[in-house]
């Protein structure tokens, strides 16, 4: 079965760090472009970052310089390293797989809640 | 940065047709994708590249895109179609989501 499962999020103080992971099954992470998308409580979807199959990465302006996307091919897992966390980073974080040549997302993880608060 | 505007809410009578719009500058030149999200669940891709339905998505869902507006059409609306819907495009190496529309089936 094709699926994505995110690691548990948590409660982090402002300025802190957290690394999310997203384990894939049924397909190969490194052969697809993979993204993180977040949703603040009661708000809409916000794209965060993408890593292409060739390794190129892009970030939303809101997280550039603070977040880093990466993958471990041997573990078939996607990561999001989040540093200098802010209250406004509080959200459910989903990992998602890209549809080849379409720049859409066809497989989504259930999401993990990250709360940034003192 | 590119922006996508959707109506906050759309209501449709059971069995009738709902149309959800997504406005953007010259959006007709881009590929538009649509997602359905029910409360507490992950989004589901229902239309990609303007008009294509992924496997398992009913034919009642269709899409169009021209000029400055893309449209998702839900025909013969069912109670189970109640959800938030988001449009999305790719622009200058970033992914942009619309503001989201809550669809209510009356």
Image (cartoon, helix red, strand yellow):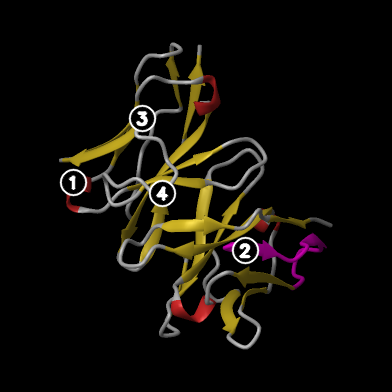
Q: Do labels 3 and 4 touch, CB within 8 Å?
A: no
> What is the span of residues highlighted in magenta in the rendered image?
A1-17
Residue found at x 45% / y 84%: A55
Identify residue for label 1. Answer: B28
Which chain letter matches label 1? B
Q: CA distance from mark 3 to mark 1?
A: 22 Å
Which is nearer the N-term, disc 3 or disc 4? 4
Q: Please, what secondary structure does the residue beneath circle 1 have?
A: helix
Which is nearer the N-term, disc 3 or disc 1? 1
**Residue A89 occupies which quadrant of the picture?**
bottom right
Identify residue for label 2. Answer: A4
The x, y position of residue A78, in whole percent, is: 60, 75
Q: CA distance from mark 2 to mark 1?
A: 32 Å
Which chain letter matches label 2? A
Which is nearer the N-term, disc 4 or disc 1? 1
Residue A3 among those drawn in magenta: yes
Identify residue for label 4. Answer: B55
Q: Please, what secondary structure does the residue beneath circle 3 have?
A: loop
Q: Do labels 4 and 2 touch, CB within 8 Å?
A: no
**Residue A7 occupies which quadrant of the picture?**
bottom right
**Same-subunit check for callouts 4 and 2:** no
**Same-subunit check for callouts 3 and 2:** no
Which chain letter matches label 4? B
Q: Give the label on residue B72, or none.
A: none
Identify residue for label 3. Answer: B60
């Amino acid at each position: 079965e094709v699926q994505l499962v995110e690691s548990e999020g948590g409660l982090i103080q402002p300025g802190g760090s957290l690394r999310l992971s997203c384990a894939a099954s049924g397909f190969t992470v490194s052969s697809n472009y993979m993204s993180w998308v977040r949703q603040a409580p009661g708000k809409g979807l916000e794209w965060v970052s993408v890593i292409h199959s060739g390794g190129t990465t892009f970030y939303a302006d809101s997280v550039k310089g603070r977040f880093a996307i990466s993958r471990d091919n041997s573990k078939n897992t996607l990561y999001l390293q989040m540093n200098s966390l802010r209250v406004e980073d509080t959200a459910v974080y989903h990992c998602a797989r890209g549809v080849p040549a379409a720049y859409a997302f066809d497989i989504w993880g259930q999401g993990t809640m990250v709360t940034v608060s003192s | 940065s590119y922006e996508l505007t959707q109506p906050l809410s759309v209501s449709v009578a059971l069995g009738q047709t709902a149309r959800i719009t997504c406005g953007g500058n010259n959006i007709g030149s881009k590929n538009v994708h649509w997602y359905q999200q029910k409360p507490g669940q992950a989004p589901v891709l229902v239309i990609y590249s303007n008009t294509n339905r992924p496997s398992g998505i009913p034919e009642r869902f269709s899409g169009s895109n021209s000029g400055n507006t893309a449209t998702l059409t839900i025909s013969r609306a069912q109670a189970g179609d109640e959800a938030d819907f988001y449009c999305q495009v790719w622009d200058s190496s970033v992914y942009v989501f619309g503001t989201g529309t809550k669809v209510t089936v009356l």
